Image (tube, helix red, strand yellow):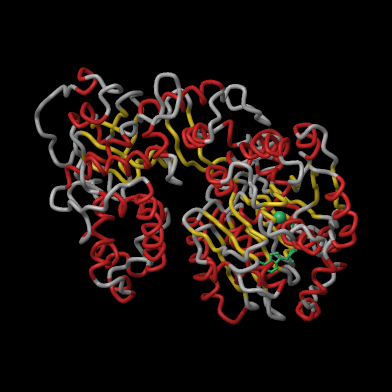
Amino acid sequence: DFIQALQMPGSRDKIKKEPELTEQEKKKLTIEETKISLPIFPFKEDLIQAVQEHQVLIIEGETGSGKTTQIPQYLHEAGFTNDNKKIGCTQPRRVAAMSVAARVAQEMGVKLGNEVGYAIRFEDCTSERTIIKYMTDGTLHREFLSEPDLQSYSVMIIDEAHERTLHTDILFGLVKDIARFRPDLKLLISSATLDAQKFSEFFDDAPIFRIPGRRFPVDIYYTKAPEADYVDACVISILQIHVTQPLGDILVFLTGQEEIETCQELLQDRLRRLGSKVKELIVLPVYANLPSDMQAKIFDPTPPGARKVVLATNIAETSLTIDNIIYVIDPGFAKQNYFNSRTGMESLMVVPISKASANQRAGRAGRVAAGKCFRLYTAWSYKHELEDNTVPEIQRINLGNAVLMLKALGINDLVHFDFLDPPPHETLVLALEQLYALGALNHHGELTKMGRRMAEFPVDPMMAKTLLASEKYKCSEEVVTITAMLSVNSAIFYRPKDKIIHADTARKNFNHVAGDHLSLLNVYNQWRDTDFSTQWCYENFIQYRSMKRARDVREQLVGLMQRVEIEMVSNISETVDIRKAITAGYFYHIARFSKGGNYKTVKHNQTVTIHPNSSLFDELPRWILYHQLVFTTKEFMRQVIEIESKWLLEVAPHYYKPKELEDSTNKKMPKTIGRATKTD
Ligand code: ADP
Ligand code: MG
């Protein structure tokens, strides 16, 4: 369809008038020149003055205008970091916090981690000397526990406020409260879109500082019919642009690492076949779990005569700005956590984006010159099927973690907490019930000693409970390892297309009969026994980088275990205790075998299926515990272990009644009954 769109006489005329990109000229710009060229620069003095005059300021400016990288530097120059105070700046995304900190350190000519640093979950890259600190919103939320008045900060910038993540939304309430009794603290709420008025009203009519954007027109194209396979459609569109359009980089929005890798492989495969018939096309991925040196590559200037295509998650929608993007390809999807407050089930799924997101994405094409955005959906679908705005996270995800944190901060009355948009009542109630069942709250809704200890861990309450339960079951070493491996949340197993059989054989060697958590434990322990060898990872198709991160996370967790005074002891010989500890945290996530190779969740009778990657895929134990649900073609359980139903009465007697756990038959299940073949 695009060939047609691209060949429409009108659009071709327009293309001719567009100047080719002047990469060489761009490259010549020094850091200083780049800073001066940013839209925010002419407003430097006005901005500093506004911050001096007002305690709370709402800042609105388009993505790429320089808010995130420049404002902290301006305020530092204006003296806000005197008296040993820091300027803090929150980001909803880990990658953004790391990337902007690196950029600002470079602009200021200092080493990252010294004057300019960042802090994200399980990683603190700051020091005593740090005066500009970027962090995730979740990290600042957690800092309130140790520093409830944010005394070490002179300025706090809640950046990317329009993203409306759960943590950002809660921070609004917390910082608003603090501002009242810390008149010396400056608050900046910065946003890329049109929510400024709403933020202003929330912060008692705080003034709005607008940075006029520079935007070139972007032509938008739609497909005539819906695309059956949008990854494939992306590949075709990229190649079409590459052969028919003038130079200029391409930005493609995909939903996650796996999709990006698939797209990259397909694309490189076709490029190889085209050989020297086409100009050079540099393919660069960017997603949260990509190592930071690889992430940094997207900012390298494209060599003259070549074209760059960046395959990104929606991190590139507003959090990161890549210069020289002229073409945007938007399939119209993003990955979101979706929580069903009726069943209490949370699942990761790919959903259509909102109109606001679609327009942000299109806008990425018009920063340096007129651009084009190719939407892989129909104009009808844009108009009639996309919601206007993305629903804020607080209204669609599980609040267990947030409620535990607020309780730990001494905020007991959550119904009257100052929310920008309050969460649905039933979600709040469910979170309280879950925390009660986990033993974190007593029947008055007050934090228990258990809850206080749980709040020490920057993990989901269920995971925190598992860590604490490892004390009773004397297997803290193993549970900490399993938690670290699960927290890495990116591919541990490497599965290159041309060596799938080898990779799968290697993987099977780690399989544990009791399930995936224990297989992960096997991987880690064997790696540890080789003294953390890179070679071993390579030979066993294990991703070394993921393992290294697991080791770092593990180290942090061991430190936190010491804080809550749990001794590190090992109990590897018998996995029952390890599995009981996991069950003590995840007793909400239990399913029992039902007909047709499916499972039903115990409490709500929802149909769920073991993920084909699981080591229990062919085993079909009667009772299983799952770590996570992922919805693709159906509701898949990722990472499962076999449990015994009687453990549920042992670890959660107040939640399960013996009657619910009765087996209709005591016969052992036959091994395989008409299972589908192993596909993903
Ligand atoms: P905003 O926060 O308003 O969206 P930023 O401050 O993030 O804007 O970005 C301003 C400019 O800084 C971008 O246009 C880009 O040129 C540059 N920039 C930001 N991060 C990096 C980076 N990691 N490497 C190189 N340039 C960067
Ligand atoms: Mg920004």
| Residue 680 visible in the snapshot | no
| Residue 392 visible in the snapshot | yes
Q: Quick check: 95 left or right of 82?
A: left
Q: Quick check: 507 left or right of 352?
A: left
325 or 160, which lies in front? 160
Location of residue 380 (image quadrant): top right
Return the x and y of residue 337 as percentages of the image width and height: 51, 39
Location of residue 277 (image quadrant): bottom right
Q: Quadrant of ligand 2?
A: bottom right
Give the answer, above or below, for where 65 lies relative to 544.
Answer: above
Outermost left residue: 667
Residue at point 63%, 34% (across, down): 391
Outermost front residue: 83
Location of residue 162 (image quadrant): top right
Residue at point 54%, 67% (across, down): 292
Residue at point 79%, 32% (across, down): 204
Return the x and y of residue 514 as percentages of the image width and height: 19, 46
